[in-house]
Image (cartoon, helix red, strand yellow):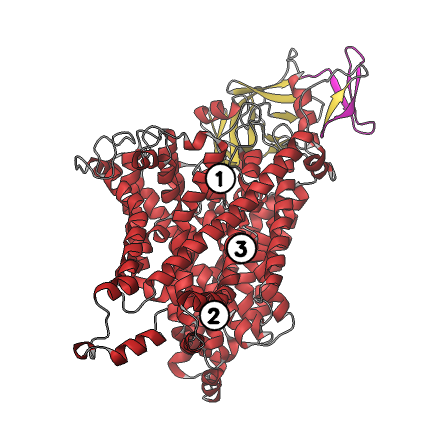
Amino acid sequence: MSNPTQQDVATTATAVKPALNDTRPHGMRWWTEIGWRHIVGILAVVYALIPVLYIISASVNPLGSVSSTSLIPSEISMVNYTELFTNPSRPFVRWFVNTMLIATVVVLGQIFCSALAAYAFSRFRFRGRRGGLLALLLIQMFPQFLATVALFQMFTMLGEVIPAIGLNTILGYMILLMGGALGQVWLIKGFFDSVPRELDEAAKIDGAGHAQVYFKIILPLVRPILAVTGLLAFVGVIGEFLLASIFLRETGVKTLAVGMYGVLDADRSNNMGWFAAAAVLTAIPVVLLFQYLQKYIVGGITAGAVKG
Amino acid sequence: MSKPTLSTAPPEPRLSRRATGTTAVLPLVVKVLAAGALAGLAVAITPPLIAQQRWAFLAIFWGIIALLVAVYATGRAVPAKYLVPGVLFLVLFVVYPILMTFQLSTTNYGDGTRNSKEVTITRILGTSATQVEGARSFGLAVGTTGTLVDGPFTFFLVDEASGDVFRGDEDGLVELEEGDVTITDDVVTEASGFTMLSRTDINDAGKAGGGLDGFAVPTDTGGIIKAQGFKAVELETPLVYDEVEDTITDTRTGTVYTVQQSGDRSYFTDADGNRLSDQSWEESVGWANYVRIFTDQRISSNFLGIFIWTVVFAVGSVGLTFVLGLILAVVLNDTRLKGQKVYRSVLLLPYAIPGFISLLVWSSFWNTDFGLVNDLLGTDVAWLTNPTTAKFAVLMTNLWMGFPYMFLVATGALQAVPTELKEAASIDGANGFTQFRTVVLPLVLVSVAPLLVASFAFNFNNFNAIQLLTEGGPFTPANPTAGGTDILISYTYRLAFGTAAQQIGFASAISVILFIITGVLAALQFRGTRALEDVN
């Protein structure tokens, strides 16, 4: 749809002279070809923004209750935000640090493992390679939390031997989430496949080993896709709720998802202000990251599908 | 367990031999660090494993170490060096738990059946025990190797008469040497490897239903040691367990209790059908949990209804989000459109906001009295208390959360459609819509099909979307276990971790069925798409 159609070509050819070097349509033509797109776009923007506006409005509402919150705040106060940093029974800062720590470590670990495996699948030919790729695809369909009970028992036992990675420990929860270590293999492999093999071979002739080729040549080339897969994994870890709700029960080790849910669930009508303020502060870094990586995201998500 | 692989790069032996100068330093450092971490871990973990007699764990642990050494210390099997870290995590924390889930699904494990048969018998004997004259009493301390709430617990006992020190759990009593523990005022205050419980902790854990409730240590002489306040006393029981006959005999009355099945549980029951105790234990029940899913009238009707809604929810979510995302992508994908970037940035927002936040906020939007939806529409609908409107609300919420993703996907796919194809179609005289339908749409569908399948599989088990929005509700008094918006995974979660009596074995059986359904549906759909044909 984005390219000039036959009609456009025809009109430009016969168009009045001043329009010759200005191919943008005007008047009614502008409305039928472009203007209506703005209307749809604005409607979509309104649809996307209303809930966001509501959260922001609720976060500055000093009463903090659902019933007193509207889309346009009638009174602006920072009381909910200061409460985030001062109420020791709802340690927002602690939960925030926990979450960012967990997300960073797990994402780095997952991307590291995924990229390694993707390289093996892309560059080496070995027995069981095709089978391994397909098995990976199938296993990824099973969410880890379907085995929650077994995982719970497993980490109960692990905790008896090594208390540092048992239940109610951040380290244990991180290790648990590393079960998704190969989650991004397919996406990354698609990108490795698009890097010409001649590059590897040239480097090998120069005397580089396979690890050198991988770390020094291939990996830097696929940085954009690593960023995108990292972002997707990051969002996944931050939003993980089920396992965290079972594994992290003590206040000090909770993640934002579990902690904030607990606060809101305790009193849905009156804790909205606190929750909204926490939501705004939680969402800002993620949204900024998304905007920063936006140009890679479109390509990255579809590349996995297109390149298979 | 496999922490070293997480933090360190796989060392590469041949590289260091070939490369010269500074490039050889880094791999060597990495290798030394990895080997050091591995050795340190092995040294740290082996003694407690041996002390706690966890042989299977020990074997797995050393198996992993052997595997890592075999892969990284030799120059063979280069692909393995790249695959081992991820595969190890996948096997340990996904594949193995799946197998464990299957094993659990053939047991009756759950509330009331958490203990082994031995422990249950000790507890039954313990409840009937009474104090006899001249019995030993002890200064009591409780230690744990796990959590202060759930244990596992160990009694540390100091005999008040003789001063002998013992350690006891439900397997029996062990005498300790003087130097093993620290004793202050006839109570053990420190024991290596254990966290000692404070008096408050002991009180909390000892409450009904707590991990210490009913805790009893059998002695060699057939007695039982139980806590009484902050002391422990040896009690005598009239009950005698006969291992050969598998019966318990009451020596006062001569009544013999044998093991009788009732439902999926076993109890010690006398000839008249009176139970000695309501305590049961974990045991294998074969396929009983699976049979129950399909034959128990109430559960099978729940199951079918929930299954249908799960499919509707997954298909509906994918369908709605994709249609809206595609429409927006087509409309906004015009290079002449000013502010295209602004539109994209804003439409990305619902996707960028962490899902749990959106869901919880939306759950308040559907509130009848103060919710934003009724406010904006000027209606007064009790959205989340009627099963039909609640289902609608769930789908609408998921639409808001999911359309940006599909918008991005569709935009990417549209931009990948070759311009020549569209030009050729328009030369053939196709108008805008026909051209879109016959040329662009098929190409877009082919390229996004695998993502749609993945999205379906994700939504099929989209626990958060249900739990954080409606918690599965609304519930009717007639059927308090299955709510109006429950999908299979949220229903299973409640069975296993809900506040009612936990039925973990049964929940595991449903999990296994979910595994199978997810796998079959995904496999079918992948066959339908061409995704797997050009795996190379």
Looking at the rendered structure, which numbered label has been put on residue B439? 2
> Residue B40 lies in magenta, yes or no?
no
Picture quadrant where residue B20 is located? bottom left
User: Height in image: B18 above or below B255?
Assistant: below
> Crowding at label 2, few (<14), some or many (≥20) Cα neighbours within 10 Å?
some
Question: On the rendered structure, is B366 left or right of A11?
Answer: right
In-front residue for pair B491/A72: A72
Picture coordinates of residue A1, whole percent (x, y): 37, 68
Quadrant position of the C terminus of chain B in the picture:
bottom right
Q: Residue at x 47, y 82 (%)?
A: A200
Which quadrant would residue A203 be assigned to in this image? Answer: bottom left
Q: Chain of mark 3?
A: B
Secondary structure, mark 2, is: helix
Query: Which label number is shown at residue B43?
Result: 3
Relative to B398, A272 lies left or right = left
- Which element carries disc 3, helix, strand or loop? helix
Q: Secondary structure at mark 1?
A: helix
- From the image, tell me which residue sits under label 1: A246
The image position of residue A299, as x and y in percent, is 40, 67
Compute the Cα span from label 3 to label 1.
31 Å
Q: Residues within 10 Å of mark 3 (few under 14, many from 20)?
A: few
Q: Is residue B336 above or below residue B515?
A: below
Count of numbered circles in the view: 3
Q: Residue at the location (45% across, 78% down)?
A: A195
Kindly report which numbered mark, 3 or 1, lies closer to the viewer in this rendering: 1
The mark closer to the camera, 1 or 2, is 2
Q: Specify start and end residues of the magenta stretch as a single range.
A: B236-264
Nearer to us in this view, A150 or B43: A150
- What amino acid is at disc 3? Val
Residue B258 falls within the magenta-colored stretch: yes
> Disc 2 marks which amino acid?
Val
